[in-house]
Image (cartoon, rainbow, N blue to C red):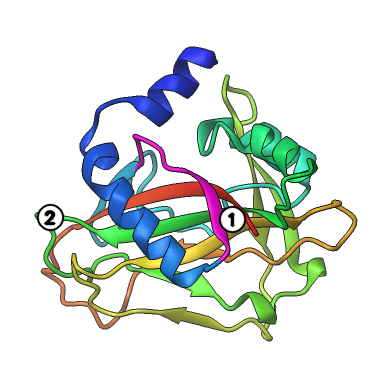
Amino acid sequence: VAVRDERYTSSDTPARRIWSKEAESILKSVIPGAASLELPSQGVRRESTMGRFSGKGAVSLVHNDLPLDVDQACEKASRLAPRMRQQREQLQGPDGYKSLLLCNLWRPIAPCKKVQAMPLCLCDASSIAPEDFVELQIAPDEPGSLQITGLKYNPRQRWFYYPAMETDEVLVFRQFERAKGDSAPPVMPTFHTAFCDPTAPANAEPRISFEYRVSMLTR
């Protein structure tokens, strides 16, 4: 685990050399209290056309990548943000941090010019009710299975997407947040899914996207 942690956070990769600096600047501009950011050397590249894909293709399932419980989230975050557990310990310490936060920076990347096939759709967190949550286990019978949070349909939910995103545009959304003390109710994450846009042309180029998750403490 220590070797994977070190590789995830310190390997010399394009994500580390280039994207981490831009991601840090973006996050500090939209989250003024952002501090102690863990900027990984790796992210997830996905490529999809108009169909439903598995593996590293677009995920056409409404979900959030972590459980909502803070203990489960820190345990399951080992693949997404290996140092969340240590950051949670820092949060409870005397350094004046207010919350633990995990954000996803999602963007199309070259050679994709414009996202038309399988764009990303996001649910307004204020339109979600706790009774909408569903715990999901991905590949429960296989090593390294994932526990994530799904969402039942509710007509009150409001969904949005940004059509025809280009490579100079980035979506930043919250996947986990917990305030110091752990007693407050969890902040709603941003549930999301890829979807087949009926307005997209039949010959739309494949979607190629990159997701980059950053855990941080806030002041």
Q: Name the residue tied to disc 2.
A: 110
Residue 213 vs 121, above or below: the answer is: above
From this viewpoint, is residue 132 visible?
A: yes
Q: How far apart are the alpha carbons under marks 1 and 2? A: 26 Å
- 93 in the magenta segment: no
Q: Amino acid at mark 1?
A: Asn
The residue indicated by pointer 1 is 64
Residue drawn where x is 9% and y is 55% of the image: 111
Q: Nearer the viewer, residue 57 or 160?
A: 160
Q: Is residue 58 above or below residue 9?
A: below
Left or right side of 92 for 77 = left
Q: Residue at x 34, y 69 (%)?
A: 196
Relative horizontal placement of residue 181, taking residue 197 as reference (left or right): right
Q: Name the quarter where the N terminus is drawn.
A: top right
Measuring from the top left, give residue 193's x and y in whole percent.
47, 63
In which quadrant of the rendered view does residue 169 lie?
bottom left
Quadrant where the C terminus is found in the figure? bottom right
On whether residue 40 falls in the magenta region, the answer is yes
Q: Pinpoint residue 92: horizontal percent, then vertical percent.
A: 80, 43
Query: Sequence order check: which comes first, mark 1 or mark 2?
Result: 1
Find the magenta span and give its range: 33-43
In this rendering, is residue 135 above or below 85? below
